[in-house]
Image (cartoon, helix red, strand yellow):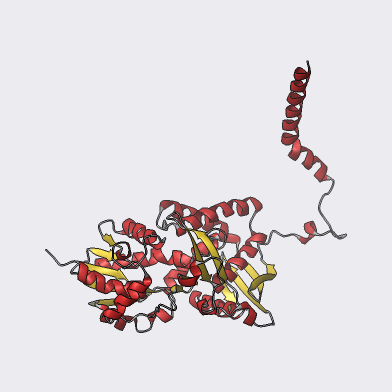
Amino acid sequence: MAKNKIVVAYSGGLDTSVMVKWLKDNYDAEIITFTGNLGQTKELTGLKEKALKSGASKVYIKDLQKEFLEEYVFPALKTGAMYEEAYPMATSIGRPLLAKALVEVARKENANMVAHGCTGKGNDQVRFEVSVGALAPDLINLAPLRMWQFKSREEEIDYAKAHNIPVAATKDSPYSIDENLWGTSIECGVLEDPMVEPPADSYQSLTPIEQAPDEPEIISIEFSEGLPVCINGNEMDSISLVKALNTAGAKHGVGRIDMIENRLVGIKSREIYEAPAATILHFAHKELERITLDKSVMHYKSLVAHEYANLIYNGLWFSPLREALQAFVDKTQERVTGLVKVKLYKGNVRVSGRTSAYSLYDPALATYTAEDQFDHAASEGFIKIYGLPLKTYNRVTQKITNEKKKKAVA
């Protein structure tokens, strides 16, 4: 029999670092690691050396930042997809792209298995395995964290020390951190107690609100058909734009989310997210839609955004429904072009102004001054027709109720 060849989705964190050695020994396999660069900074340092030292025979590191933003993040931004109305899903959106790239490496290396470092009660196991199954149903998915003997991160740390595997996690600071351009997730350790305020060392890039500047910063963001293209009049590529907003938002403490969320596997978990650029862009995009989208389109799109967010969060990016919803969203964005001014201050984002050539806001209709052109006299007939069904329904209800009362008295 040919020797097993396993491509590992490798982050360089505690779980995947331990996993390389564990898989090599337990499956008598050649281990190849794949890391997708989605904009994480700390994890890429010394990654190749760490993977080889852990037992990998070959290391792939691919820059996916542009594809990540333009083919995954921005479609979700145009949709307004926020899981449970709060989370811009930085981690969730990255998983289908990583799964796609993982499959590409597996095909290139003629591997028969792929492996991920997701836990048995997390969402990412679903996202990876469902995505791999959609793209390469013949590949075997391995999830060591669902199978191995370790019951805690502390035990993994001990294993890493025993086998000279370099890891950053310590027993005093056992956070699990996932970072990319669109945001950072922080969990585990003391954060598992929802009554504990996140300690200072849990902050990754944001300035704590108490230390944020006392002066606000106003930023102008221009959109073209729903996509951000300029900051303060400077046209920027997708990566530079998001990085610039991450820096500005982090400076003012914007984009921290402390959330109890409903995981796909049926449990609630406490998650801390830092997403400065995502928070700013979702806010600005929504403000631009408020003046450019027709009322019925805007209201229906909110339903689509809710479903779209669930699809991403639940690992169904490559589903026919997500693709169909995207077609609807792309049509709605044809007129979402214009400029939004936002004010960043002490962890908050506020709108300072918005304008668009496609604006449906008409001052002559909205004003209460002498320039008012709204036909007030037309409202009487409108109200009569608009309220007629409800008036008729309740007239009939009242008639039946009165007849029942008369029969009860008789």
Rendered image quadrant of residue 113: bottom left
Residue 353 percent coordinates (x, y): 70, 70
Identify whether 35 is placed above or below 398: below
Judge from the rendering whether residue 76 lies leftward or rightward of residue 38; answer left or right: right
Identify whether 323 is placed above or below 343: above
Judge from the rendering whether residue 297 lies leftward or rightward of residue 13; answer left or right: right
Q: Which residue is drawn at 49% across and 53% down?
A: 325
Q: Can residue 236 be seen in this view?
A: no
- The total number of labels drawn is 0
Rendered image quadrant of residue 264: bottom left
Judge from the rendering whether residue 35 lies leftward or rightward of residue 23; answer left or right: right
The front one of 301 and 381 is 301
Q: In which quarter of the image is the C terminus?
A: top right
Q: In which quarter of the image is the N terminus?
A: bottom left
Q: Which residue is drawn at 36% across and 75% down?
A: 14
Residue at the extreme right of the image, as rendered: 370
Residue 342 percent coordinates (x, y): 66, 73
The front one of 335 and 16 is 16
Q: Is residue 106 visible?
A: yes
Residue 392 percent coordinates (x, y): 74, 31
Residue at the extreme left of the image, as rendered: 1
Residue 373 percent coordinates (x, y): 82, 55
Judge from the rendering whether residue 30 lies leftward or rightward of residue 70; answer left or right: left
The front one of 278 and 357 is 278
Rendered image quadrant of residue 134: bottom left
